[in-house]
Image (tube, rainbow, N blue to C red):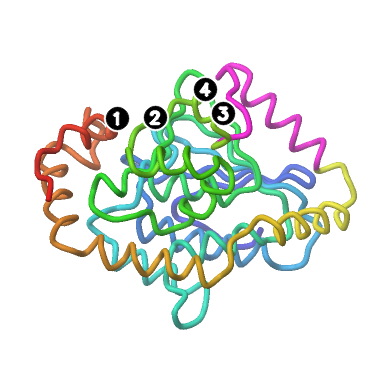
């Protein structure tokens, strides 16, 4: 890897690249994270012999809690640098991540909600710490549908009923329930997670590059959503998240401590259920 990054650290070990997100204070997906992801995805898309990328977080409490709700326009503009007109969205950036010619594995500790969960869903595989990983799609509770891939991926992975449950309740899912539903590949004891993922990455990284890429492309052709559907989800999210209802409910969450390390961010699913400002 040749680029320098503000919010992620990289380490190359043979054919396996480790990428650690580090965006204090709580690893929000904001303009700097998106800028770094655009550069990283562009690098991963280039022809090469890299086989596997493992993503994790420097913050044990927060993988990616969600986007920075104060900088939607700014991070959207950064995402647009990954594509052409009409592609300024996290959904399109994550779709490009899903199609890079390397195998992507997410190693999850802490909270991955909203676009954080959607980043995980864009990866090829997801393994989470049983004791502390939390996944959720809080967007409906705020006032908009998910817009960066959750509607597409969760419906394919979980089935219609469970996808509706995950999206419409905006609830937090612990790792065991997420595994049972198919949101993640496996929930693994925290003490064993690093070794498990390292062994899997090394195993995959030892196989022929062309075979890995060809197999991934074939599965992508069956399982990934159409670009038009990704764009439509992103447009609806961007419309509604800027609307009066979402802005009012977000303001109340900020009053309660959203985007800090307090109880609102740690237990966002509960905070959403307690919001009284309904339509």
Q: Is residue 190 above or below residue 14?
A: above
In the displayed structure image, the side of residue 121 where residue 202 appears, left or right: right
Q: Residue at x 50, y 45 (%)?
A: 160
Which portion, as a residue range, is magenta?
184-204
Q: Circle 4 — which element?
A: helix
Q: Label 3, label 1: how many angstroms apart (C-alpha)?
A: 20 Å
As drawn, the label of residue 277 is none
Q: Position of residue 227 (x, y in %)?
A: 56, 70
The residue that label 1 is drawn on is 266
Question: Tags 4 and 2 in contact by the CB under 8 Å rule?
Answer: no
Q: Nearer the viewer, mark 1 or mark 2?
A: 1
In this view of the protein, which residue sits in the foreground, 149 or 2? 149
Q: Residue at x 74, y 38 (%)?
A: 201
The first of marks 4 and 1 along the sequence is 4
As drawn, the label of residue 176 is 4
Q: Nearer the viewer, mark 2 or mark 3?
A: 3
The residue that label 2 is drawn on is 61
Q: Circle 2 — which element?
A: loop
Q: Quadrant of residue 257?
A: top left
Q: Total label count?
A: 4
Q: Circle 1 — which element?
A: helix
Mark 1 crowdedness (10 Å alpha carbons): few <14, some 14-19, many ≥20: some
The first of marks 3 and 1 along the sequence is 3
The residue that label 3 is drawn on is 179
């Amino acid at each position: 890897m040749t680029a320098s990054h503000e919010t992620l650290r990289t380490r190359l070990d043979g054919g396996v690249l480790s990428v650690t997100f580090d965006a204090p204070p709580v690893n929000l997906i904001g303009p700097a994270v998106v800028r770094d992801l655009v550069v990283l995805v562009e690098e991963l898309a280039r022809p090469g012999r890299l086989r596997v990328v493992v993503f994790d977080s420097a913050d044990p409490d927060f993988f990616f809690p969600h986007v920075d709700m104060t900088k939607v326009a700014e991070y959207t503009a950064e995402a647009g640098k990954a594509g052409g007109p009409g592609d300024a969205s996290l959904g399109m950036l994550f779709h490009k991540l899903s199609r890079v010619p390397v195998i992507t594995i997410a190693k999850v500790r802490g909270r991955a909600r909203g676009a954080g969960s959607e980043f995980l869903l864009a990866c090829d595989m997801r393994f989470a710490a049983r004791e502390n990983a939390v996944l959720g799609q809080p967007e409906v509770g705020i006032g908009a549908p998910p817009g960066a891939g959750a509607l597409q991926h969760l419906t394919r992975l979980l089935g219609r009923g469970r996808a509706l449950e995950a999206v419409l309740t905006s609830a937090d899912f612990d790792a065991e329930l997420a595994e049972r539903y198919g949101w993640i590949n496996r929930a693994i004891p925290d003490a064993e997670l690093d070794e498990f993922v390292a062994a899997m990455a090394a195993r995959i990284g030892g196989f022929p590059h062309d075979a890995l890429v060809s197999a991934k492309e074939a599965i992508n052709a069956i399982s990934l959503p159409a670009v038009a559907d990704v764009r439509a989800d992103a447009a609806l999210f961007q419309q509604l998240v800027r609307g009066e209802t979402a802005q009012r409910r977000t303001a109340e969450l900020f009053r309660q401590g959203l985007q800090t390390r307090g109880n609102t961010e740690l237990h966002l699913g509960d905070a959403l259920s307690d919001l009284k400002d309904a339509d």
